[in-house]
Image (cartoon, grey):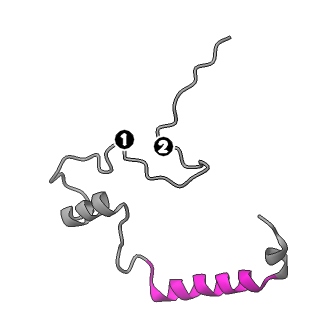
Amino acid sequence: MTTEVRADLYPSRGAAEMTTPRQDPVIWSAPGAPGPIAAKDLQGYEHDGFLTVDQLITPDEVAVYEAELNRLVSDPAVRADER
């Protein structure tokens, strides 16, 4: 039985912090290809590595999530869990 060892092109858990150049494109479609995201937003995503979407969740949803986070923060069982 043989085992092939391959280099990890995207190491993320090393002893030291480092920046790793991208090996693959961030956006796979051709420039100008139709899709749900505007070209300027895609360019920003390719450059910055993240995409913001205004009004993706409503203020009411944010309030629900915030209340749940506050509940979790004050829950002794959650605070005692070392995970």
Rendered position, 11 above or below 70 = above
The residue located at (36%, 60%) in the rendering is 49
Rendered position, 20 above or below 45 = above
The type of residue carrying mark 2 is Tyr
Q: Where is residue 23 in the image (x, y as percent from the top left)?
A: 36, 41
Circle 1: element type? loop
The residue located at (53%, 55%) in the rendering is 17
Residue placed most toward the observer, 48 or 42: 48
For residue 18, side relative to residue 30 (left or right): right
For residue 48, side relative to residue 30 (left or right): right
Quarter of the rendering occupied by the C terminus: bottom right
Which residue does the numbered mark 2 point to in the structure image? 10
Quarter of the rendering occupied by the N terminus: top right
Q: Exactly how many numbered labels are in the figure?
A: 2
Q: Where is residue 73 in the image (x, y as percent from the top left)?
A: 72, 82
The residue located at (22%, 65%) in the rendering is 38
Callouts 2 and 1 close, C-beta under 8 Å: yes
Q: Which residue lies furthest to the left in this view?
A: 32
Write down the region rendered in magenta. Answer: 57-75
Which residue does the numbered mark 1 point to in the structure image? 23
Q: Which residue lies furthest to the top in this view?
A: 1
